[in-house]
């Protein structure tokens, strides 16, 4: 890959992140109401106290450049202020507490569904009209069209409430996380099973449908005929020639989805009361916890940008034509 | 997997003695087990390849027979859609999913390939019959280095080691005149002519008995076209390749081929030595075809055209398929499929103008 291509992509990503930071600053300054009134929550405050508070937080200074400089300075240092809802906790620590469960649930779900979806889609497309295609593509379409809570509800009804195999919600039983080594992991796995199944099933359809059409498109390319003319086995034609080309559109989709992983699968997390960023978003929204929302917004936006950068780089490795 | 270096089974009279490691078109391994050493290299008999289209069958190749002897170059000519490419691809059954070989035989060293299962047929692809596709830009995989694509059949079909296949691929690229600094190139990094050279190198990878050139120079400009043809001709002479060249460019056939097969609407119209067919065309279609070709030495008169268009091959006319457009059409032509008349100079013609089976060469 040429340095020029890489440099261009990195610069583009950096530019986008700067724009996001500026937008994040302006968006929340444009909201009605004033921070000191929300925080102090007392309508009968004397103007002197309000003024003193404004001065303490730098709100008496003009938006540009003072407030913006201060904002950028603290953002770069990872300081996003303090949560309104979780009193005394910094936004950073509130988000840090929730990021692990989300990465575990959505990251793992993304991984499982990408591998399974690509495998099913590739096979269905290669043997178009075969059994895998008819069963797999039908199921994929149904799953793709179902929101997480529609997938999650029946799973809870059958496997948690009905059969009692798995707990209905949460990430640990009471005291479950404090048990000795294998027991705490098993407890986590039992809690993870249903939400993970929901997230995986929800994503698998999307991947397999796209992969199927990519393989079908690739299959009619001339170089596939060349590969067959070479007398290569069917499996090798698929693996070595059709698959790498069909993966090109998949890389972009996977990377964009990975960016959203950080945001959490909100409905899936809510259905299973999973303590991730998705439930945090809902909590912060209903409590009007602007600093936390601002933090989540920035985190999701930046990770989408970084995931896209990763997609561009991987694309460049897979497809020599875009390296330039 | 690698088979022992056997004595070349078919030794042409004029090939110089072989040295190990030299890139050769001659066989470096024995003939397939069931092969008949006395049989001609390739004998196609009454080949019928149809395509399923809606409720009917398109008779794309109907009753085509021809032979190819060792070291020979055969030109397949005819207008677009006459079944040239389908005929060639039928040899190794590289047909679209709706294509079927409905009858006839393709005998390579006396082994009928039509009777082979798909898996058994794979063994003959590339190793015995390889193809130079037209439009190398699309026929080469865009995301794999050209050298790796050439090495692939050596690695996977001949069972050579990765290092040996790569080395052989480099030799082949050198042979077709691609400079060694372009070894790591991807298809899009090469010019059209270079890509076609790479395609030729790939076709030579397994020392095939027969190379099919499917319009190998169509997409190239005249200068590059000439270079590629020169390369093919040189390789053919040096490696003793047997070549089937599909083209609608008659001058290419005149320059490179020993024999020519003129096809019309899925059937053979005329076949014979290039010198004979081009100087003494006997089938009215061949005459029209030659008349429709610009000649740089002749005066600038308007080119001849053939009125009408080729028949619909879902429902071809019952007699001679050229009858509706033929200037010399007779009543019998629209009813009876013309039998092949064989002339003493080796030309055979499917036309009612020549009724008796064997003819004297016309004066």
Image (tube, rainbow, N blue to C red):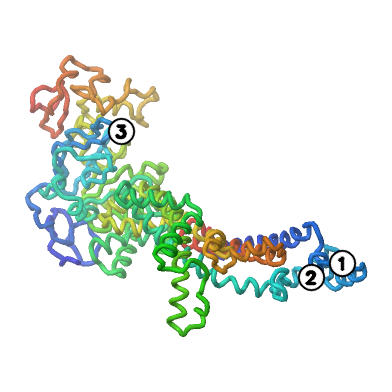
The foreground one among B341 and A133 is A133
**Label 1: chain?**
A
Query: Is residue B181 visible to us here?
Result: no
The foreground one among A255 and A52 is A52
Q: CA distance from mark 1 to mark 2?
A: 10 Å
Q: Quadrant of residue B24?
A: bottom left
Q: Position of residue B60 (x, y in %)?
A: 25, 34
Q: CA distance from mark 3 to mark 1?
A: 80 Å
Q: Quadrant of residue B279?
A: top left
Q: Which residue is mark 2?
A: A70
The numbered disc on residue A61 is 1
The numbered disc on residue B81 is 3
Within 10 angstroms of label 3, few (less than 14), some, or many (20 or more) residues? some
Q: CA distance from mark 3 to mark 2?
A: 73 Å
Residue at 25% in and 28% down: B286
Q: Are marks 1 and 2 in contact (CB under 8 Å)?
A: yes
Q: Position of residue A128 (x, y in %)?
A: 33, 48
**Label 3: chain?**
B
Q: Single out the mark in the foreground, 3 or 1.
A: 1
Residue at 67% in and 61% down: A285
Residue at 22% in and 47% down: B92
């Amino acid at each position: 890959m040429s340095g020029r291509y890489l440099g261009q992509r990195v610069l583009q990503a950096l530019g986008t992140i700067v724009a996001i930071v500026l937008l994040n600053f302006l968006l929340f300054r444009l909201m009605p109401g004033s921070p000191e009134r929300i925080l102090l929550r007392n309508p009968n405050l004397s103007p002197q106290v309000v003024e003193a508070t404004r001065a303490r937080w730098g709100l008496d200074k003009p938006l540009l450049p003072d407030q913006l400089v201060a904002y950028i300075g603290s953002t770069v240092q990872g300081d996003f202020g303090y949560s309104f809802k979780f009193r005394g906790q910094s936004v950073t620590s509130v988000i840090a507490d929730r990021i692990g469960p989300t990465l575990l649930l959505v990251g793992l779900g993304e991984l499982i569904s990408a591998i399974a979806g690509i495998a099913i889609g590739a096979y269905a497309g290669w043997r178009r009209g075969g059994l895998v295609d008819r069963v797999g593509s039908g199921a994929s379409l149904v799953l793709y069209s179902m929101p997480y809570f529609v997938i999650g509800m029946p799973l809870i009804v059958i496997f948690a409430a009905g059969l009692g195999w798995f707990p209905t919600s949460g990430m640990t039983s009471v005291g479950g996380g404090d048990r000795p080594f294998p027991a705490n992991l098993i407890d986590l796995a039992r809690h993870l099973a249903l939400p993970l199944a929901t997230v995986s099933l929800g994503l698998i359809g999307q991947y397999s449908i796209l992969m199927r059409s990519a393989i079908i498109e690739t299959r009619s390319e001339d170089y596939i005929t060349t590969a067959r003319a070479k007398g290569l086995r069917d499996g090798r034609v698929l693996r070595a020639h059709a698959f790498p080309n069909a993966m090109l559109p998949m890389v972009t989709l996977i990377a964009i989805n990975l960016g959203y992983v950080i945001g959490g699968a909100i409905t899936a997390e809510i259905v299973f009361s999973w303590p991730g960023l998705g439930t945090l978003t809902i909590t912060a929204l209903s409590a009007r916890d602007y600093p936390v929302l601002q933090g989540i917004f920035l985190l999701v936006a930046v990770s989408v940008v970084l995931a896209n950068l990763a997609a561009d780089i991987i694309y460049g490795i897979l497809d020599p034509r875009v390296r330039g | 997997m690698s088979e022992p270096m056997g004595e070349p089974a078919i030794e042409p009279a004029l090939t110089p003695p072989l040295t190990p490691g030299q890139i050769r078109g001659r066989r470096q391994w024995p003939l397939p087990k069931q092969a008949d050493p006395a049989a001609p290299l390739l004998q196609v008999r009454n080949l019928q390849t149809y395509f399923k289209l809606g409720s009917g069958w398109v008779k794309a190749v109907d009753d085509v027979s021809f032979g190819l002897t060792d070291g020979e170059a055969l030109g397949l000519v005819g207008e677009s859609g006459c079944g040239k490419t389908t005929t060639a691809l039928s040899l190794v059954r590289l047909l679209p999913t709706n294509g079927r070989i409905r009858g006839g035989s393709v005998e390579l060293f006396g082994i009928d390939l039509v009777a082979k299962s798909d898996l058994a047929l794979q063994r003959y692809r590339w190793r015995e019959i390889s193809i130079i596709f037209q439009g190398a830009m699309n026929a080469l995989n865009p995301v794999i280095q050209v050298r790796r694509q050439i090495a692939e059949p050596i690695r996977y079909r001949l069972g050579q080691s990765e290092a040996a296949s790569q080395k052989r691929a480099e030799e082949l690229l050198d042979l077709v005149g691609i400079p060694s600094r372009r070894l790591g190139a991807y298809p899009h990094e090469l010019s059209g002519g270079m890509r076609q050279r790479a395609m030729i190198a790939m076709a030579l990878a397994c020392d095939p008995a027969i190379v099919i050139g499917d319009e190998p120079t169509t997409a190239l400009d005249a200068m590059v076209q000439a270079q590629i043809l020169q390369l093919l001709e040189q390789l053919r002479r040096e490696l003793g390749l047997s070549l089937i060249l599909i083209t609608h460019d008659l001058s290419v056939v005149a320059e490179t081929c020993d024999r020519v097969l003129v096809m019309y609407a899925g059937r053979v119209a005329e076949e014979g030595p290039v010198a004979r067919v081009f100087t003494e065309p006997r089938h009215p279609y061949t005459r029209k075809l030659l008349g429709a070709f610009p000649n740089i030495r002749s005066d600038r008169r308007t080119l001849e055209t053939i009125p009408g268009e080729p028949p619909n091959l879902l429902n071809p006319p019952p007699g001679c398929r050229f009858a509706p457009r033929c200037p010399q059409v007779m009543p019998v032509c629209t009813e009876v499929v013309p039998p092949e008349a064989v002339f003493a100079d080796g030309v055979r013609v499917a036309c009612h103008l020549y009724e008796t089976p064997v003819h004297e060469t016309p004066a």
